[in-house]
Image (tube, rainbow, N blue to C red):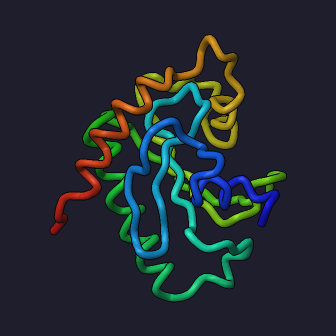
Amino acid sequence: MSDCLSCLSNNGKKRISPAATIYEGKYWLVEHVNPTGLLGWVVIVLKRHSEKLHELARDEWHELSELNFRLTRALHNFLQSEKEYSCCFAEMEGFRHIHFLVIPKTGKFNKENTGSKVFNYLRVPESEALSKEEIIDFCKLLSKEMNTKWE
């Protein structure tokens, strides 16, 4: 799909993150969103192209569930998040490909950006966006955590 930004990122032609992939499973990839004003905003992206949740296979749902579990725990441990948001809309132009956002609500979180207003962190001016170095450093830590054996 030449106009699918998720597919372009998955195949390396136009990456969504300046960092290496945090985790690669059988069906899903984990990446850090960029640009953003919020450290730890990650996305779980389906490796194959699909735009509908009802098209996901049982095995894809099982892996997704485990990734959500591991990511929310890891984000809480690294960022001391108060809570975490997880959502899937897959409706924006170029991003209809199934992907789930996992967003940590941390001490850096502004009260006016709670709930659906969290997307304000994707609309920050360049001067308020995380640097590529901050994202890369965080992704290295998170990747190490996600790639260790969990009980």
- The image quarter in which residue 90 lies: bottom right
| Relative image position of residue 115 (x, y in whole percent) | 63, 41
Q: Quadrant of the C terminus?
A: bottom left
Instruction: Answer left or right for 123 relative to 38.
Output: right
Q: Residue 47 sits in which quadrant?
A: bottom right
How many numbered badges does the structure rendering display? 0
12 in relation to 24, above or below? above
Q: Name the image quarter holding residue 126.
A: top right
Residue in view at x 62 percent, y 11 percent: 127
Residue beneath the point at 58% across and 35% down: 34
Residue in the picture at 50% in, 50% down: 102
- Asked if residue 10 lies left or right of residue 66, the reply is right
Residue 87 position within the rendered picture, expressed as x and y whole percent measured from the top left:
60, 56
**Height in image: 27 above or below 107?**
below
Q: Where does residue 132 sit, x and y in percent of width and height?
A: 49, 26
Residue placed farthest to the front in the image? Answer: 13
| Residue closest to the eye, 91 or 114 | 91
Viewer-nearest residue: 82 or 124: 124
Instruction: Identify whether 86 is placed above or below 122.
Output: below
Quadrant of the rendering where the N terminus is positioned? bottom right
Spot occupied by residue 59 in the image (x, y as percentages of width and height): 46, 86
Please state which of residues 36 and 13 is positioned toward the viewer in this rendering: 13
